[in-house]
Image: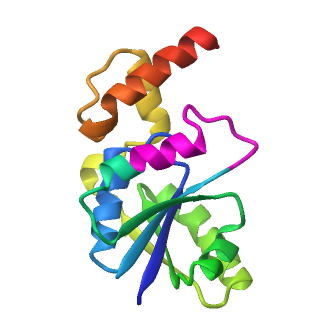
Amino acid sequence: MKIAIYPGSFDPITLGHLNIIKRAALCFDKLIVCVMVNSQKNGLFTPEERVELIRRVVSQLPNVEVDASSILLAEYAKQRRARVIVKGLRAVSDFEAEVQMSVINRKLNHNVDTMFLPSHEKYTYLSSTVVKEMVRYGVELSDFLPREIIQDVKKKTEESRRDG
């Protein structure tokens, strides 16, 4: 079975992420979308909430599984028997950092390779950070987020604004 991992923070998942997920899912028997937990970062959503949002968005993709991990990606890939790490590239500037990470992952796990998928041109500008900024300014979100989670993101952003 060909297993790949698509790692990220997904805070929140965007249409750009979803585009990569759909395209990568066509290439593998199983694609694991993994929320990588960084204890140094406080996200808008908790890792558990992100997993739930992603599950809702990918529910129609039978070979896509959603998980979260706080261990090194290379080790996680080994544990899940994944041979490929999928990374989306929005711009040339992403490439340099991602190549460095792929070399490190390969050093830590000789059985894993990285597959780079360029973002669809519609989404080259799109990031979770941009989306969170757009929410704060009341911009229509249907060009940025899967419809299934728009209300969740608006609500969480409002709560975060009130609390913080």
Q: Residue furthest top?
A: 162
Name the residue at 33% across, 72% down.
63
Q: Is residue 114 above or below residue 34?
A: below
User: Residue 26's x, y, as percent?
Assistant: 27, 75
**Which image quarter is the C terminus in?**
top right
Name the residue at 39% across, 22% down.
154
Picture colour scheme: rainbow
Confirm whether the magenta stretch covers residue 43.
yes
User: Residue 92's x, y, as percent?
Assistant: 46, 60
Q: Give the magenta range.
A: 38-54
**Residue 35 visible in rendering:** yes
User: Residue 46's x, y, as percent?
Assistant: 59, 38
**Residue 144 visible in rendering:** no
In this orientation, which residue lies closer to the viewer: 108 or 126?
108
User: Residue 56's x, y, as percent?
Assistant: 34, 47
Count of residue discs:
0
In this orientation, which residue lies closer to the viewer: 55 or 92?
55
Q: Is residue 71 left or right of residue 124?
A: right
Quadrant in the picture for residue 75:
bottom right
**Which image quarter is the N terminus in?**
bottom left
Q: Is residue 7 above or below residue 47?
A: below
Confirm whether the magenta stretch covers residue 99.
no
Q: Is residue 142 left or right of residue 81?
A: left
Q: Is residue 164 above or below residue 20?
A: above
